[in-house]
Image (cartoon, rainbow, N blue to C red):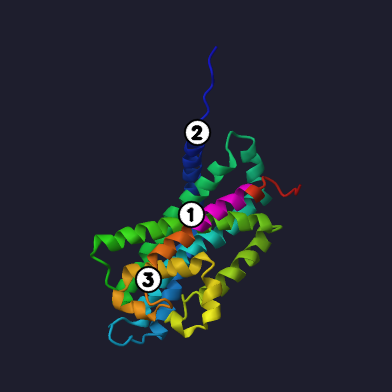
């Protein structure tokens, strides 16, 4: 008697990731807007605010570029997945997938693969704007790029899982947009993405922001693309890379637990 061996959840997730990428790039308007939005915001705001920080030679436009890398990733992961997962549930895609051997974890992995590729392309575009318009110098130290790699991965995974969880809170795809955008926009302001330096913000606001990934992702990327002389404009006077890894890593775990606890394949609530 032949025993049928099913693919592993990882194999199923990788296959689902390829499908997600194909579906995403077929919708050209969505792909273009996703990639262009952070770069467009950077080009506008960076041209308006162009002060130079004393004793560093770094402009506020360059600081904004580094922070927008993190903000762009979070928009692609948290905001977009909040809507797309809710839409998959609303149009019956999730119910059809439930009839296949796909476990929920594989579905999560497929979405994370989509976000990883989209965020990487988005990051390249933001850096092109930062280098071309605002004279940002890309790091030559391999250690800086290693920091970029782990901050990027942790930001993508943690915020993707939070986005999937947020989709479970929304009653529909249209309401998911409102549920996700309100905290995302608010956290950008209190996390030092648009307000440079972050030390201009009230300490209480920054304390609240410190519980969420936006601040740490933006700060982590500032440590990659800005000189160490800029640490004096951070709240702690350092890049706090250890704490960045701890907070983003913790959100990866918390996000996965929340997803597994709340994820549902249909609009019907138990």
Question: On the image, numbered disc 3 is attached to which residue?
Answer: 239
Of badges 3 and 1, the one in the foreground is 3
Q: Which residue is mark 1?
A: 157
Q: Mark 1 near mark 2, Cβ–Cβ under 8 Å? A: no
At x 30% / y 72%, what residue is drawn?
131
Please give the residue where the numbered disc 2 appears in the rendered image: 8
For the residue labelled by badge 1, is the local secondary structure a helix, a strand or a loop? helix
Helix, strand or loop status at disc 2: loop
> Secondary structure under badge 3?
loop
Is 101 situated above or below 4?
A: below
In the image, which residues are magenta?
Answer: 250-260
> Of tags 3 and 2, which is closer to the observer?
3
Relative to residue 269, is residue 78 drawn left or right?
A: left
Is residue 258 a member of the stretch shown in magenta? yes
**Residue 50 placed where, x, y %?**
37, 85
Q: Which label's residue is closer to the chain start, 1 or 2?
A: 2
Residue in the image at 51% along x and 73% along y: 188
Q: How far separated are the C-alphas under marks 1 and 2?
A: 20 Å
Q: Earlier in the sequence, mark 3 or mark 1?
A: 1
Where residue 245 sits: x, y (%)?
43, 60
Residue 149 vs residue 124, the one in the foreground: 149
Please, is residue 231 above or below residue 82 in the view? below
Separation of disc 3 and disc 2 at Cα?
39 Å
Q: Is residue 77 or residue 47 the one in the foreground? A: 77
Q: Residues within 10 Å of mark 3 (few under 14, many from 20)?
A: many
Q: Main secondary structure of the magenta part?
A: helix
């Amino acid at each position: 008697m032949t025993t049928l061996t099913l693919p592993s959840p990882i194999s199923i997730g990788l296959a689902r990731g390829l499908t997600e990428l194909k579906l995403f790039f077929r919708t050209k308007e969505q792909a273009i807007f996703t990639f262009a939005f952070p770069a467009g915001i950077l080009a506008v705001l960076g041209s308006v605010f162009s002060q130079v920080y004393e004793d560093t030679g770094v402009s506020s436009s360059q600081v904004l570029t580094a922070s927008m890398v993190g903000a762009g990733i979070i928009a692609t992961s948290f905001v977009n997945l909040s809507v797309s997962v809710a839409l998959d549930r609303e149009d019956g895609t999730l119910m059809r997938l439930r009839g296949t051997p796909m476990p929920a974890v594989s579905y999560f992995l497929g979405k994370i693969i989509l976000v990883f590729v989209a965020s990487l392309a988005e990051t390249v575009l933001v850096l092109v704007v930062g280098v071309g318009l605002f004279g940002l110098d890309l790091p030559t130290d391999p250690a800086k790029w290693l920091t970029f790699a782990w901050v990027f991965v942790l930001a993508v995974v943690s915020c993707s899982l939070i986005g999937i969880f947020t989709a479970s809170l929304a009653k529909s795809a249209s309401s998911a947009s409102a549920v996700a955008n309100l905290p995302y926009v608010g956290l950008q302001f209190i996390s030092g993405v648009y307000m440079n330096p972050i030390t201009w913000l009230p300490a209480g606001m920054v304390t609240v922001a410190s519980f969420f990934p936006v601040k740490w992702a933006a700060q982590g990327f500032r440590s990659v693309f800005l000189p160490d002389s800029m640490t004096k404009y951070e709240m702690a006077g350092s890049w706090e890379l250890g704490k960045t890894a701890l907070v983003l890593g913790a959100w990866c775990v918390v996000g996965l637990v929340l997803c597994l606890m709340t994820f549902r394949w249909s609009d019907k609530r138990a």
